[in-house]
Image (cartoon, grey):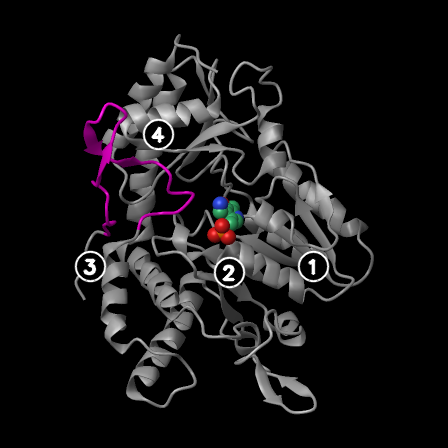
């Protein structure tokens, strides 16, 4: 098929300003949920005439839908560079995927996690060693090394994000995977903010588990993935008990032996999964080099624009030069984050997010030293972008933020 530049739906949708004028939306909130790709819409439209339940029916529509659903699994496997023997389980989102993994981890497993994680990766573990926010990537590697060395014998799991949802910074997952391997530990990577921006190859990087969400990958809500080693998943009780997860039910219940069947009880979100796989295909077809180069240009423009504003401070974990994806958080002197976000929306038609981004310990750490100068309530503003974003969106944000100088409101 012909390769087209990927386009998102609704990129130029008009939005009302406080004064009643309408302007094209500048969506700078991709890290929360990305808009849908046209290719995703088309894939769902193609699937709808054969709308049917998977696996159980013998009718033609059910066969077609089952095939599409299982093909989607293989698309995701290829997209992630997972092994053929790995499980690819469809979940609701990253949160669901991490909770499934936490459910399947053998009891007594030592879990090590950085406290800078998104709550989806920080909170599901029954017990975990929490490592403080590292001052450098090298310190992250060293801290993981020491923590894993100190864990008792038995199963071990290191949990880490691939790209921060707060600063966009890329974590050294290749090196962390090597550290895990040295200690006989497994590594689970929260790739929610990486896969919309960069390719990921689980096999090449030596990752044991990867979780991500369709709605951050230009597909609609409600479908996500946990991919990785099948043994723990096969040995665990079903995450949800019900039809599909059971092989036979009499006096006793025998659970389905495959990890996918065991943990996908009930009628699955077939259209969500088809949409998610279509997004994987569309991004791959667009080419990661082209996508990343475009994003780097927009990111450089945004960061230069913010750096020129003395009242705006970008939050970074590891300094200005650390590599990152198109996500930037910042504070504005004299303004609280909510008022900045509301002003950007109401006066400029710009959508950003404000708050603590479900990463409270990390945001607290990044704001330490603010001295109450900006966003005194412990929150920040986040601008994040992707395929539908333009230079005009970036420039509009920088111009709007420039106007906030001197007009303190908190
Ligand atoms: N991890 C990261 C890094 C995220 O950015 C998010 C979403 N903000 C999640 C996990 C949770 O994703 P979801 O809400 O789709 O479960």
Q: Residue at x 45, y 38 (%)?
A: 324
Magenta-colored stretch includes residue 15 = yes
Alpha carbon distance from label 2 to label 4: 28 Å
Alpha carbon distance from label 3 to label 4: 27 Å
Side (left or right) of 215 relative to 322: left
Q: Residue at x 41, y 23 (%)?
A: 340
Nearest to the observer: residue 112 or residue 52: 52
Q: In the picture, which quadrant includes the N terminus? A: bottom left
Alpha carbon distance from label 3 to label 2: 26 Å
* Residue that label 1 marks: 185
Q: Residue 118's x, y, as percent?
A: 57, 44
Alpha carbon distance from label 3 to label 1: 41 Å
* Residue that label 4 marks: 300
Of pointers 2 and 1, the one earlier in the residue sequence: 1
User: What is the secondary structure assignment of the residue under circle 3?
Assistant: loop
Alpha carbon distance from label 1 to label 4: 37 Å
As drawn, the residue found furthest toward the top would be: 406
Question: In the rendered structure, which segment of residues is drawn in magenta?
Answer: 6-35
User: What is the secondary structure assignment of the residue under circle 1?
Assistant: loop
Give yes or no for contact between labels 3 and 2 (Cβ–Cβ under 8 Å).
no
Side (left or right) of 130 relative to 329: right
Give the number of marks.
4
Does 388 sit above or below residue 102? Answer: above
Give yes or no for contact between labels 2 and 1 (Cβ–Cβ under 8 Å).
no
* Residue that label 2 marks: 202
């Amino acid at each position: 098929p012909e390769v087209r530049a990927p386009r998102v739906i609704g990129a130029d949708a008009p939005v009302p300003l406080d004064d009643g004028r309408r302007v094209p939306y500048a969506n700078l909130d991709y890290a929360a949920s990305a808009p849908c790709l046209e290719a995703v819409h088309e894939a769902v439209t193609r699937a709808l005439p054969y709308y049917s339940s998977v696996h159980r029916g013998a009718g033609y529509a059910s066969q077609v839908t089952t095939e599409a659903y299982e093909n989607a699994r293989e698309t995701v496997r290829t997209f992630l560079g997972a092994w053929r023997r790995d499980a690819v389980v469809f979940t609701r989102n990253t949160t669901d995927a991490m909770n499934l993994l936490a459910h399947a981890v053998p009891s007594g497993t030592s879990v090590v996690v950085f406290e800078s994680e998104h709550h989806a990766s920080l909170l599901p573990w029954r017990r975990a060693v929490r490592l403080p926010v590292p001052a450098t990537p090298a310190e992250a590697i060293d801290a993981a090394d020491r923590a894993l060395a100190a864990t008792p014998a038995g199963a071990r799991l290191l949990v880490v994000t691939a790209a921060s949802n707060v600063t966009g910074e890329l974590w050294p997952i290749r090196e962390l995977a090597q550290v895990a391997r040295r200690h006989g530990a497994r590594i689970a990577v929260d790739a929610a903010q990486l896969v919309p921006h960069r390719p990921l190859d689980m096999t090449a990087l030596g990752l044991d588990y990867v979780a991500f969400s369709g709605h951050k990958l230009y597909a609609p809500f409600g479908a996500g993935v946990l991919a990785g080693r099948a043994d723990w998943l096969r040995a665990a009780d079903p995450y949800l008990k019900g039809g599909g997860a059971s092989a036979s039910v009499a006096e006793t219940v025998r659970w389905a032996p495959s990890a996918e069947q065991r943990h996908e009880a009930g009628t699955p979100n077939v259209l969500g999964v088809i949409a998610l796989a279509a997004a994987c295909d569309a991004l791959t077809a667009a080419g990661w080099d082209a996508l990343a180069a475009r994003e780097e240009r927009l990111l450089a423009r945004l960061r230069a624009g913010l750096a020129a504003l003395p009242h705006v401070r970008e939050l970074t974990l590891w300094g200005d030069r650390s590599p990152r994806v198109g996500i930037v958080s910042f504070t504005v002197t004299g303004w609280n984050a909510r008022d900045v976000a509301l002003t950007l929306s109401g006066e400029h038609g710009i959508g950003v997010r404000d708050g603590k981004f479900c990463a409270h310990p990390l945001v607290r750490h990044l704001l330490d030293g603010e001295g109450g100068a900006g966003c005194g309530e412990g929150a920040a503003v986040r601008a994040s972008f992707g395929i539908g974003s333009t230079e005009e969106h970036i420039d509009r944000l920088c111009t709007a933020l420039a106007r906030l100088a001197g007009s303190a409101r908190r």
